[in-house]
Image (spheres, helix red, strand yellow):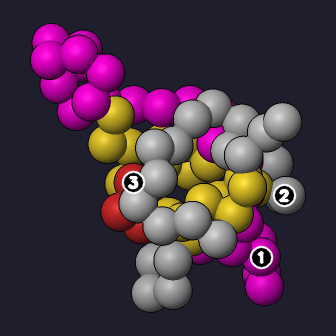
């Protein structure tokens, strides 16, 4: 697992312990990054600090980059 790495579309991530949402699947905290979001709407470049993660139950949830750790990158 990689901590503090630059996240990209298609990365496989895990939501860190202590972060919870009712829509996350039971016993599964892993998912696929499907969208990168920035807090400044592009005014200061590609400073992405949020991401949408799609889970195995089909739900897409938004998290801050500090709430996830990368498991693997696409080939």
Q: Is residue 65 visible?
A: yes
- Overall secondary structure of the magenta stretch? loop
Q: Is disc 2 placed on a helix, strand or loop?
A: loop
Where is mark 2, residue-wise? 57
Front residue of 59/64: it is 64
Query: Which residue is located at x 78 percent, y 85 percent?
Result: 27
Front residue of 75/52: it is 75
Front residue of 28/44: it is 44
Q: Quadrant of the N terminus?
A: bottom right
Q: Quadrant of the C terminus?
A: top right
Where is mark 1, residue-wise? 28
Where is mark 3, residue-wise? 65
In contact (CB < 8 Å): disc 1 and disc 2 = yes
Query: Which residue is located at x 56 percent, y 50 percent?
Result: 61
- The stretch in magenta equals 21-47
In contact (CB < 8 Å): disc 3 and disc 1 = no
How many other residues sit within 10 Å of disc 1, few (<14), some (14-19) or many (≥20)?
few
Task: Classify 74 as above or below 21.
Answer: above
């Amino acid at each position: 697992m990689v901590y503090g790495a630059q996240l990209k579309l298609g990365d496989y991530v895990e939501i860190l312990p202590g972060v919870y949402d009712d829509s996350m699947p039971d016993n599964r905290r892993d998912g696929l990054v499907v969208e990168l979001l920035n807090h400044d709407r592009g005014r200061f470049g590609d400073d992405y600090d949020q991401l949408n993660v799609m889970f195995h139950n089909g739900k897409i949830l938004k998290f801050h980059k500090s709430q996830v750790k990368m498991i693997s990158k696409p080939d």
